[in-house]
Image: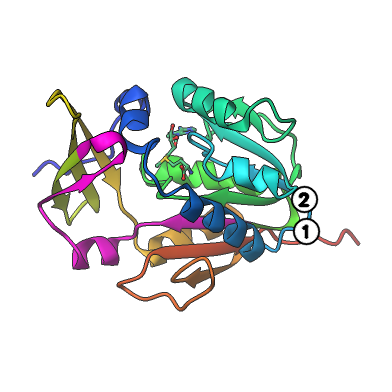
Amino acid sequence: MQERAASSIETWDAFFSDFYLRAYADDERQSEADAQALAAARLAGCPAGGDVLDVPCGFGRHSVPLAGAGYHVVGVDRSEELLAEAGRRAGGARWPKLVRADYRELPFADESFDAALNLFTSLGYLGDEEDTRVLGEICRVLRPGGRLVIETMHRDLLVSQFREQDWRLMGKGRLLLERRTFDAAAGVAQTTQTLIDNTGARDSRSVSLRTYTATELVAMLTRAGFEEARCHGDLDGKPFATDTRLILVARRPDAAYAA
Ligand SMILES: C[S@@+](CC[C@H](N)C(=O)[O-])C[C@H]1O[C@@H](n2cnc3c(N)ncnc32)[C@H](O)[C@@H]1O
């Protein structure tokens, strides 16, 4: 039997494009994103005005409010279209700085940031090995003692809420239909999203996401060099359970003492 793997990078690039912007950028819940961004920075223990890496930053819905709150935010993403929208939202302000890069190779010196954020299910695109490499890169650019906050869907929640299809009303009267399958052996969820605009025009993309358990992600964080990975059920620190989102807070170890 052939197991399903996560989608190729080309498939993700075609998804995180104008298609993703049309689906999500006009969603009316920016105030929720503002609150999430600030709660995530607090959970990371980031000092006021500290250096924060938002990776990946998408169209800037967390980077922009964090910069507005005085953090020195750098947002990194692979998608030119999403970064252009983030730049538009930043409106020419000094912060956030927006950098186009692949998060497997972050273009920053070691120990550049006080905190790092990986929000809204932003791992699982590349499979276990490459995602561990991403976590290793984030660990490298954090200062000793700095924390990474991950906010994500996880396998227990996906399985407990699994629906083969549903639909949501998005901004500007657009309808987003989702059809799903789940390969339980591979831990890969395949979703076909169809966007229908208010003229009835349709556009579809299919993607396959490796959906980790909390246990798997904690093991990956340890392999990537983090310590003290703690699980929470939301960004305000409620207890983690099978029916909550997964928030992981992981710490880069303090510098080794050289005798
Ligand atoms: C679900 S979106 C979340 C973005 C943002 N954290 C938010 O909450 O709006 C995932 C993002 O990951 C980016 N991405 C996917 N693969 C990437 C890679 N290999 N390197 C950098 N960014 C990547 C996409 O372009 C997209 O913006």
Q: Position of residue 63 (x, y in %)?
A: 60, 42
Confirm or reject: label 1 Cβ below 8 Å from ligand 1.
no
Whether label 1 touches label 2, CB < 8 Å: yes
Q: Which one is nearer the viewer's eye here, 26 or 251?
A: 26
- Say which quarter of the image contains residue 96: top right
Q: Residue at x 80, y 59 (%)?
A: 256
Q: Quadrant of the N terminus?
A: top left
Under circle 2, the secondary element is: loop
Q: Residue at x 88, y 58 (%)?
A: 258
Q: Is residue 236 left or right of residue 156?
A: right
> Marks 1 and 2, how far apart in space?
5 Å
Q: Residues within 10 Å of mark 2 (few under 14, many from 20)?
A: some
Q: Magenta segment range?
A: 148-175
Under circle 1, the secondary element is: loop
Q: Residue at x 51, y 39 (%)?
A: 56
Q: Residue at x 68, y 25 (%)?
A: 92
- 153 in magenta: yes
Q: Identify which amino acid the numbered label 1 is placed on.
A: Pro
Report if residue 79 is visible in the image: yes
**Relative vertical location of residue 88 with respect to residue 47 in this rendering, above or below:** above
- 41 in magenta: no
- Say which quarter of the image contains residue 206: top left
Label at residue 221: none
Q: Which one is nearer the viewer's eye here, 160 or 58?
A: 58
Label at residue 47: 1
Classify the position of ligand 1 by quadrant: top left, top right, bottom left or bottom right.
top left
Q: Position of residue 168 (x, y in %)?
A: 21, 47
State the residue position of label 2: 50
